[in-house]
């Protein structure tokens, strides 16, 4: 009959109107600056550099300035200068470190490729989204000091991933120590799995 | 039609009159007559101006709640200052007149629109003693003035010298003239039953209760219910409200006849739209819902203007509910609904009302027969026409999309 569809529609909106007052499942808005929702763990926006210790952020950077991320970065927003001297890295091996490590967040597209290519688990995705700045050039260009954050912060963002990375680094370190005892040769950390080259060929 | 004597009513009922007499009493004799008129104008402007302001807020709140969000809540307590913030924003905006536009008509269109909208408020009885202008043909006056708003819409579209504005104004004219007919035809049975064209007379005809608790409102008769439904659908279209908001369909015509308007002129158009909504709702209350009469004799101690306000606000929230629910019609669907459905129904309803008033003397076993025939006359055409309305027209298939 003509009009029944209209009445059904009106009933739906009336249920929403009434339900929004007593059913928190319907009324999902949070008052943002005062209330905050927990971000989903998979949320990411810009990368940050992981340091082992919160007390000495610059001294314990995992980054060894290998520049893979700089080369892989699709929008070319990473700029790295290697240091002239060497410092012991996370495994105790003497390595160069980034004297300059800049990320232009105005250019970064949050693709996470830098994270995926990093063999040292030194760069991870951050969740800070309140990045408004009054200067669109210098304020959006993050340098080494702004990017470095401790491993504990990474644990707070991604507890499972961070624990897995810590385990991996600990075993690598143990293996390096074991190898270093009989003969001086340090095992490099496990490189990430290369993208599969055995992709099925498209049918002719 | 003279107003009832003022002496045998409660103090609360007479409060507006007492206030008015006290105010005019401060003036010298010859100025009192002019002051009486001015007070009515100021009261209408203040009450409906404020009502407009808070209706915009209420509408945004209700639409928000229907969409499961809170609506404006930052300005003041529950967002109560939002309308005033919006008003200040509108006032400080630049008033742009296109170089090709006709500046005089472009300026006159919103002014004429708001003037016509305000005139419609003058004949609605807001309470037992609150009728700004008591005319013999006030129903006729109301709809004549209401139809004049269409002129302003076309003025706006034509003077903007913009093809979107002109298209939209043509569409608006087609829509408004189409719906003028069912609107008026749904009012004719009321005039027929009440035997008067005066709004005060129509309200007086709806006084009293059957068996002490069923009010004699027109909406509780078969023809009255049908006429009320037709009136409300046409009122939606006449006030350009969703789902009939084609004249300012943002997604199709930019903003319709408002395309070239900015700042406070734009706000005036919106004000006029809300005024038209209020006036048509007030007229619906007067014609069908018993005007300012209380629904039960025991509730008569509440002043009449409070009852009018309650009924008016109920109808206005109905408008908002419909806006929150229904999508916009296409122009062909819109005119088809008017010409093929509402106009025939309203014409048949005229016959139902005639039958109802001819059989007013039927009593005893004839009374159920009277109801049955009237209900059949209302429901039968509705079902038949409703079935025919959409046959062969849908569902649409898109072969090349």
Image (spheres, coloured by chain):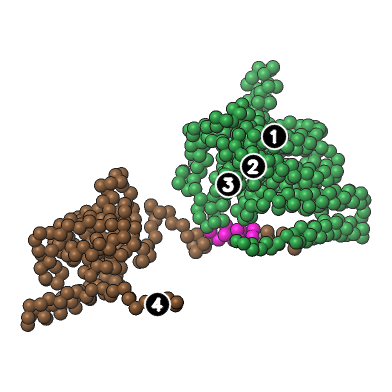
Image colour for chain A is brown
The residue labelled by disc 2 is B168
Dots 2 and 1 on the same chain:
yes
B202 vs B162, left or right, is right
First in sequence: mark 1 or mark 3?
1
Query: Which chain letter goes with mark 1?
Result: B
| Chain that the image shows in green | B
Q: Residue at x 92, y 58 (%)?
A: B366
| Mark 3 and mark 2: Cα distance apart in space | 11 Å
Quadrant containing the N terminus of chain B in the rendered view: top right
Residue A165 at least partly seen: yes
| Mark 3 and mark 4: Cα distance apart in space | 50 Å
B338 vs A109, left or right, is right
Q: Residue at x 12, y 59 (%)?
A: A83
Secondary structure at badge 3 equals helix
Query: Which chain letter goes with mark 4?
Result: A
Q: Which residues are magenta?
A: A9-20
């Amino acid at each position: 009959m003509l009009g029944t569809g209209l009445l059904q529609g009106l009933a739906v909106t009336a249920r929403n109107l009434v339900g929004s007052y007593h059913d928190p499942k319907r009324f999902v808005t949070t008052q943002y600056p005062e209330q905050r929702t927990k971000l989903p763990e998979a949320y990411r926006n810009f990368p940050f550099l992981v340091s082992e210790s919160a007390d000495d952020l610059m001294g314990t950077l995992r980054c060894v300035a290998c520049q893979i991320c700089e080369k892989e970065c699709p929008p070319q927003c990473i700029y790295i200068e290697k240091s002239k001297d060497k410092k012991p890295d996370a495994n105790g091996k003497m390595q160069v470190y980034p004297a300059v490590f800049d990320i232009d967040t105005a250019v970064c597209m949050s693709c996470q490729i830098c994270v995926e290519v990093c063999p040292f688990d030194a760069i991870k995705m951050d969740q800070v989204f309140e990045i408004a700045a009054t200067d669109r050039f210098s304020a959006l260009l993050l340098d080494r000091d702004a990017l470095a954050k401790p491993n504990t912060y990474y644990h707070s963002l991604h507890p499972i991933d961070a624990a897995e990375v810590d385990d991996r680094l600990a075993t690598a370190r143990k293996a390096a120590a074991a190898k270093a005892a009989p003969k001086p040769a340090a095992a490099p950390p496990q490189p990430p799995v290369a993208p599969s080259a055995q992709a099925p060929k498209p049918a002719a | 039609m003279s107003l009832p004597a003022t002496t045998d009513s409660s103090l609360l009922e007479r409060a507006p009159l007492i206030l008015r007499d006290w105010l005019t009493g401060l003036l010298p004799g010859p100025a009192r007559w002019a002051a009486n008129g001015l007070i009515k104008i100021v009261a209408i402007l203040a009450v409906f101006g404020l009502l407009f302001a808070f209706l915009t807020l209420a509408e945004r709140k209700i639409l928000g709640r229907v969409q499961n969000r809170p609506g404006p809540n930052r300005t003041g307590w529950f967002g109560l200052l939002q309308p005033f913030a919006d008003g200040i924003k509108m006032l400080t905006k630049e008033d742009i007149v296109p170089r090709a536009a006709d500046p005089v008509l472009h300026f006159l269109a919103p002014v004429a629109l708001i003037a016509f909208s305000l005139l419609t408020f003058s004949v609605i009885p807001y309470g037992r003693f609150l009728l700004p202008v008591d005319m013999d043909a006030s129903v006729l006056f109301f709809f004549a003035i209401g139809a004049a708003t269409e002129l302003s819409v076309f003025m706006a579209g034509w003077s903007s010298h913009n093809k979107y504005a002109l298209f939209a104004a043509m569409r608006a004219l087609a829509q408004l003239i189409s719906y003028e007919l069912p609107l008026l035809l749904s009012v004719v049975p009321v005039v027929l039953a009440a035997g008067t064209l005066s709004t005060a007379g129509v309200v007086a005809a709806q006084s009293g209760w059957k068996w002490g608790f069923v009010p004699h409102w027109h909406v509780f008769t078969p023809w009255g219910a049908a006429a009320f439904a037709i009136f409300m659908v046409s009122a939606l279209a006449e006030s350009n409200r969703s789902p009939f908001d084609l004249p300012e369909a943002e997604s199709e015509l930019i903003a319709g006849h408002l395309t070239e308007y900015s700042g406070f002129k734009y706000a005036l158009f919106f004000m006029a739209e809300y005024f038209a909504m209020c006036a048509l709702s007030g007229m619906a209350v007067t014609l069908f819902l018993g005007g300012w009469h209380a629904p039960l004799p025991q509730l008569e101690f509440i002043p009449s203007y409070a009852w009018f306000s309650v009924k008016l606000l109920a109808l206005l929230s109905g408008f908002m509910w419909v806006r929150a629910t229904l999508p916009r019609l296409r122009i062909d669907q819109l005119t088809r609904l008017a010409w093929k459905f509402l106009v025939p129904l309203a014409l048949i309803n005229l016959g139902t009302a005639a039958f109802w008033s001819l059989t007013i003397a039927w009593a005893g076993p004839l009374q159920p027969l009277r109801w049955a025939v009237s209900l059949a006359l209302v429901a039968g055409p509705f079902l038949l026409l409703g079935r025919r309305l959409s046959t062969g027209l849908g569902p649409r298939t898109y072969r090349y999309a």
